[in-house]
Image (spheres, grey):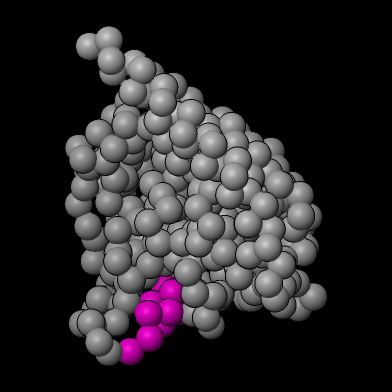
Amino acid sequence: MTKRKQIAIYGKGGIGKSTTTSNLSAALSDLGYSVMQVGCDPKNDSTTTLRGGKTIPTVLDTIRERKNNLDNIVYDGYNGIYCVEAGGPEPGVGCAGRGIIAAIELLDSNGIIEDYDPDIIIYDVLGDVVCGGFAMPIRKGVAEQVYTVTSSDYMAIYAVNNLFKGILKYANKGGALVGGIIGNSIKNSTQEAMIEDFSNHTGTNVINYVPRSSTVTRCELDGVTTIEGAPDSEQAEVYRNLARNVIENKDKIKPKPFYGDDLSEWGFTWITELLQAEKVERDNIQSEGSGI
């Protein structure tokens, strides 16, 4: 890879954003790329499955404790992945986005990225609120592409639509553009179709679908990614395919978000199909269980 690739991955809290990001990082490292993952979430849990379930000191911890050794902010993870956690304020005090601003400025101004020289940098960013701090990877042009993780849950899609509004705001000022949507926790084709329809309406694309899998849950309970804990599983191959798609994808799209009541009206058109798909799934489970 001749040019360093920098991407940001956003998603509503609890949607599986960090799980997806960590497995993407692990898959990329297995493909031979040098990867740095920067956790931009006050929970400080972006990189834990890359480090056997262990947390690391954050950038804000380092600043608060006035430590001068900047090596204290970059830690080795699975297969040599460089792990950084931005951190957040003490509970009830300060701005949660401050850690992201501090982390990016510290990595940039002190030549840390150049010293480690990763092929790919992935910023794992909370996507519920696109405020100044959380929007920094977008508005400062730190990332060249933004990916968003979503399920077919309406509030997850609502968060994606808000993110698209933020991206569009900075699109003509050198900000990052959309690389694609990652459909996560998919259980049936109707959920895929809904996400695909949303991407069509917003002028974006779906780069990969990640099915819901108990393998992921088991591996996370063991403190590892699926790539490390179940490398031969079908789910691990899904993440490897995602990694290959991210490497090959050159798309930089200006999104066309919904405004006003248009999003809720669009969502309403999917209610019947989603309920029917859930009923079919539930009936199948019951019929399979009846034979036990």
Query: Farthest residue in the top direction?
Result: 291
Closer to us: 53 or 33: 53
Predominant SS along the magenta part: helix
Q: Is residue 292 above or below residue 130?
A: above
Position in image of residue 221 (x %, y %): 21, 40
At horizontal 68% and vertical 72% (from top left) the residue drawn is 261
At horizontal 53% and vertical 34% (from top left) the residue drawn is 277
Q: Is residue 78 left or right of residue 193?
A: left
- The tally of labels here is 0
Where the C terminus falls, by quadrant? Answer: top left
At horizontal 21% and vertical 47% (from top left) the residue drawn is 53
Q: Is residue 165 left or right of residue 93?
A: right
Was residue 196 drawn as part of the magenta stretch in this picture?
A: no
The magenta span reads 94-106
Position in image of residue 88 (x %, y %): 32, 76
Position in image of residue 7 (x %, y %): 58, 56
Q: Is residue 183 above or below residue 130?
A: above
Q: Is residue 142 left or right of residue 238?
A: right
Where the N terminus falls, by quadrant? Answer: top right
Q: Is residue 75 above or below residue 192?
A: below
Closer to us: 61 or 209: 209
- Asked if residue 193 can be seen in this view, the reply is yes
- Asked if residue 211 can be seen in this view, the reply is no
Position in image of residue 113 (x %, y %): 49, 62
Q: Is residue 129 left or right of residue 266?
A: left
At horizontal 68% and vertical 63% (from top left) the residue drawn is 265
